[in-house]
Amino acid sequence: MPKTSIIAIDGPAGSGKSTVAKEVAKRLNFLYIDTGAMYRALTLKALNKKIDFSDTETLVKLSGNTDIELVDEGGSLKVFLDKKDVSEAIRTIEVTKEVKRLSPLKEVRANMVELQRKLARVASSGVVLEGRDIGTVVFPDAPHKFYLDASCETRIKRRFEELKEKGFSISFKEIAEDVKERDASDMTRKIGPLKKAEDATVIDTTDMTVAGVVDGILKIIKSGR
Ligand code: DC
């Protein structure tokens, strides 16, 4: 495998891509880049600054003027926003709900994509990037592309369990609404929509274990398919 191998993992919320991408990166000793965390960090900054989400110009300026770092600290990803650790703050329900207010903006996406490419370029090893537009926009020439999916019910259940584990009190109904709203927003935006790249391998994770998905991905990568 070339040293600078890029592995693109895309898919909707709850498809299992974060857990899988993290594990694939760990097994290959590759850098892991969670691009969703970057959109979340920017949203948190906009919320903290009480920026009106209809003020596109200010949001675009903010996206070009924000320092986002992803640091692997002993196997767990730490997210720094303007040097401050926001790893937990970006996972709140409020941030999750508001990301869709800025993620469709063309110039915001252009700034995020540039940052993602920069982070990948400086990696000394290969890179696993996960998101919505990695295989289609960020690295359309990536040698390895995967699109993870699962039934809507399974994805909602996974999100519910994940948030419950983190101590958030939110109803199943609210999670279902959020997942459906985010799917619609991610799939229908004009720039960088969630879409399977033509040359991506689709994996339906509905009835699969994390280990099963990871092993499957590693097998495909190693076979050079
Ligand atoms: O993967 P996640 O759920 O943490 O992502 C949070 C939001 O960020 C998601 O609703 C869509 C957006 N996102 C995006 O627009 N493009 C990406 N490459 C990654 C995430």
Image (tube, grey):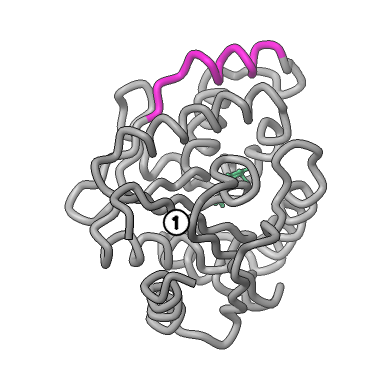
Would you say the beta carbon of the disc 1 residue lies within 8 angstroms of ligand 1?
Answer: no
The N terminus, quarter of image:
bottom left
Between 56 and 210, the one nearer to me in the picture: 210
Q: In the displayed image of the protein, which residue is found farthest to the bottom? A: 207
Which region of the structure is painted magenta? 57-68
Q: Position of residue 220 (x, y in %)?
A: 45, 75
Decide whether residue 20 is among the magenta residues: no
Identify which amino acid the numbered label 1 is placed on.
Ile
Decide whether residue 65 is among the magenta residues: yes
Q: Position of residue 55 (x, y in %)?
A: 73, 15
Between 126 and 184, the one nearer to me in the picture: 126
Residue drawn at x 82%, y 47% as measured from the top left: 188
Residue drawn at x 32%, y 50% as measured from the top left: 126
Could you tell me what secondary structure mostly forms the magenta stretch?
helix
> In this image, 100 relative to 166: left or right?
right
> In this image, 62 relative to 116: left or right?
right
Between 13 and 6, the one nearer to me in the picture: 6
Q: In the displayed image of the protein, which residue is found farthest to the left? A: 74
Residue drawn at x 47%, y 66% as measured from the top left: 162
> In this image, 161 relative to 51: left or right?
left
Residue 180 versus residue 59 in the image, above or below? below
Residue drawn at x 40%, y 46% as measured from the top left: 33
Q: Position of residue 191 (x, y in %)?
A: 75, 36
Image quadrant in which you'd find residue 221: bottom left
Secondary structure, mark 1, is strand
Between 20 and 2, the one nearer to me in the picture: 2
Residue annotated with mark 1: 7
Number of numbered markers: 1
Q: Position of residue 144 (x, y in %)?
A: 49, 60
